[in-house]
Image (cartoon, coloured by chain):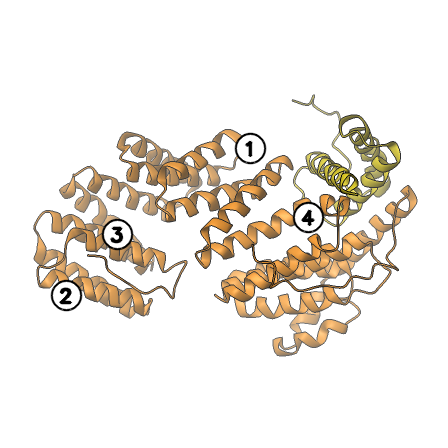
Chain colours: A orange, B yellow
Amino acid sequence: MPRGDRRVLLFPRRRAPRPSDREGLCRFGRQLEDERAAAASGKIDRLLESTPVERWSELAEHPDLRNYGALEYLGRMFADMLARDPRRAHVLAQLGVSLSENLPAGVYPVTTVTQAKVYAWKDLGTALRILSRNQESIEALLTAESAILQHHHGAGAGALIHDLAIIHFSLAVTYQEVQRFTESRELLTSCKAVFREHEDDKRYLLCGFAEGVLLQRLRNYREAREIYLLLFATTKNMETESLAALHHTIGLCCIELGDFAEADDNLAEAIALNRQMGRPIEIMKIELGRGRLLIRQGNHVRAIDHLRPVRRGFLRNSMPEEAGIAGLEIVEAMLVLGRTSEAETLARKIVREFTVARLSSRAITALGYLSEAIATNSAPVTLVTEVREYIVSLRSTPERDFRGKT
Amino acid sequence: MRPPKSRPDPTPHAPEAFYDHYIPLLVDLGTSECGLSRADAQKLAHEVLVVALGSVGRIDNMRAWLTATMRSAARLHQETDAAR
């Protein structure tokens, strides 16, 4: 891991309190409780609502925000805001960093000040990743890491090992975005062990999924399946949603490995679990996998019959990208069956759907290339697979260019 | 597997009960399992509880979190000592 791009942080070491007796530690616990109650009282929400986003940075000196409880509360607001409005979440994360770097001296133990900084920088790193500013995301997350490693030698770093694993997980995700797969895998392996030891089932599962997805991207389906199977064996109290997701991904790996019966069993189980939870969209996504299974088994006519209603379902639910992917599976089956004209018509229809939905111009270009190749009878079936996989890859690497191998 | 408990473990919301419940467990773990002196084990146990107080929303299983963190802190403490 590169060490050169870490920033050095300064901590108020000398004046920090050390609640090393029962009374001191309990007083500190009550102080945090008071701060958390005050933060959750609604005054922070009102403060942010009444301040234009472009002036949030000025709140770094606000007395209601300059404490640990308020920083934790901002972290929860950030998590809620991130998916809805990542730019606003980014500004909030920047405010969090300013506040964490300027907590009043002598009020908190050194490790608590470090935790404040660590999570503020982590949120900033997360926001930057969502905004596709991956190098800056890495720098922010390495700053969070260095807060723990450079300023807490020995026992202090040991007490913050769970926090360090949380940072490493986030860093591993960003590394995947920039194709630094080896470093990502190393981090995932180490933080997964920490989460397991701490019985942090939720993060342990997330870590396992991230590791499996990474291996799937590298086409290492066998090892990915082993990782997923291990999650079954080692996770206690797995929620139905996670269980269904595991069956789904195992099913997809089995398709690629040619273990069709196992694939069918896992996909059927995933559908049954999602049916229990009333999640029709997830069921459609699994049915898409079943269509893929039929193609791999050589049942092309059945695959087309199976995938057409799946594709219509995605379109009905305003999911043109998924509909396009289902459509490309159908195109592939049609080409194998020699139904070239139908395949070309469908490919052009998908281009139009992507254009109307203003999806990635790169995806549209690749689809156009495919349509032309089909029209001139120069499209091998593998080109359809390449275009489909390329479109899926744009979700994680939107800047990637299409370079057809065939 | 642990036997079922008659009442739930105290949370950091009640600091005194939290302290009284977990300090003996962590100090005992530090001395008997990790081989620390009693003074070092007490110091580390306090450090671990301070971090736990700052981590409330991130901990699913407090007992597992505390014991795993104590082991990690003890391990690094011993490594640091050995390097001196």
Find the distance from the CA under tag 3 to the CA under tag 1: 34 Å
Whether labels 4 and 3 belong to a single chain: the reply is: no
> Which residue matches tag 3?
A326
Amino acid under disc 4: Gly
Q: Which residue is mark 1?
A: A237
The amino acid at mark 2 is Glu
- Measured from the top left, where is residue A88 in percent x and y? 57, 70
Q: Residues within 10 Å of mark 3 (few under 14, many from 20)?
A: many
Give the residue drawn at x 80%, y 34%.
Answer: B22
Whether labels 4 and 1 belong to a single chain: the reply is no
Q: Is residue A262 above or below residue A378?
A: above
Residue A362 versus residue A23: which sits nearer the camera? A362
Mark 2 belongs to which subunit?
A
Mark 2 Cα-neighbour bin, 10 Å: few <14, some 14–19, many ≥20: some
- Asked whether the residues under the numbered discs 1 and 2 touch, taking CB atoms below 8 Å apart as contact, a structural biologist would say no
Q: Are marks 1 and 2 on the same chain?
A: yes
Foreground disc of the pair 3, 2:
2
SS at mark 3? helix
